[in-house]
Image: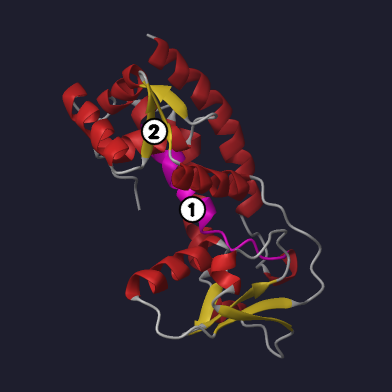
Amino acid sequence: MEERNTLSARSAVLSALLGSHPPRLPARQLVRIGALFGIAEGTVRVALSRMVAAGDLLQDGRFYTLSERLAERQARQDESRDPHTRPWDGTWEIAVVTAERRAPADRAAFRATMTALRLAELREGTWMRPANLVRAWPEAVTAQCTLIDGRPHDDPTPLLWDLDGWAAEAHRLERALDRSLDRAGGLAEGFLVSAAVLRHLLADPLLPRELLPAGWPGAELRARYDDFDRHYREVLYEHLKG
């Protein structure tokens, strides 16, 4: 699947800030990023005003930065590039939902939290993954679940994740990274490919090597993206200074 060649003003602004460290850019540079995709200056500025009003962005004079909620998303994105793992001893984390009568919005927020923690749902209300990640359980999980450490008799990995699909998309993105800056309109294409890689890394289940198929491309995609990002950011910042 090729990256779409257009972005909304909101998506362009968010992608730019999520990819910036610190996530703080002046309106002028955000307007120039929008221009890469044919987005008019007025459209970008309206989007910025609406995002501030919605609590997505904070404004400090001519600068815009991510809200706390979106800063947490950037932290997860950064973690997906350099994950904190530990040796796996065969134990699985199992979270069984025991809370009752949750509102639809609460259930949706819970699912988003579990996905961000890289757990997968074996059946409704039962989430699990190998215990190889270094992280704490948030209160949103401990308040709604019974947590169990266990060892399944059979490997449930094929039931929980589409590893072949993730690997195929990772290989496609590797090829896209290799060619993006060499093609016409490289800045716009590179921006889109960069955002696509970061989204894909967020979907990596970060399984221990014992559960991964041979030739798993996770580490290779991260290494290629790190190299691409160093070069691309230099070119992009030169463009934004112009």
Where's the C terminus, which quadrant?
top left
**Where residue 57 sits: x, y (%)?**
37, 36
Amino acid at pointer 1: His
**Where residue 92 sits: x, y (%)?**
70, 77
Residue 2 can be seen in this image: yes
Among the 4 quarters of the image, the one containing residue 91: bottom right
| Highlighted range, magenta | 189-208
Residue that numbered label 2 is attached to: 58
User: The residue tagged with tag 2: helix, strand or loop?
Assistant: strand
Q: Is residue 142 above or below residue 18?
A: below
Among the 4 quarters of the image, the one containing residue 86: bottom right
Residue at 49% in and 38% down: 177
Left or right of residue 47: residue 139: right
Label 2: few (<14), some (14–19) or many (≥20) C-alpha neighbours in 10 Å: some
Q: Nearer the viewer, residue 224 or 19?
A: 19
Amino acid at pointer 2: Leu
Left or right of residue 95: residue 151: right
Residue at 54% in and 52% down: 201
Q: Is residue 76 above or below residue 227?
A: below
Residue at 21% in and 22% down: 41
Among the 4 quarters of the image, the one containing residue 134: bottom right
Q: Is residue 67 magenta?
A: no
User: The residue tagged with tag 1: helix, strand or loop?
Assistant: helix
**Where residue 70 sits: x, y (%)?**
45, 45
Q: Say which of marks 2 and 1 sits in front.
A: 2
**Where residue 13 sits: x, y (%)?**
34, 34
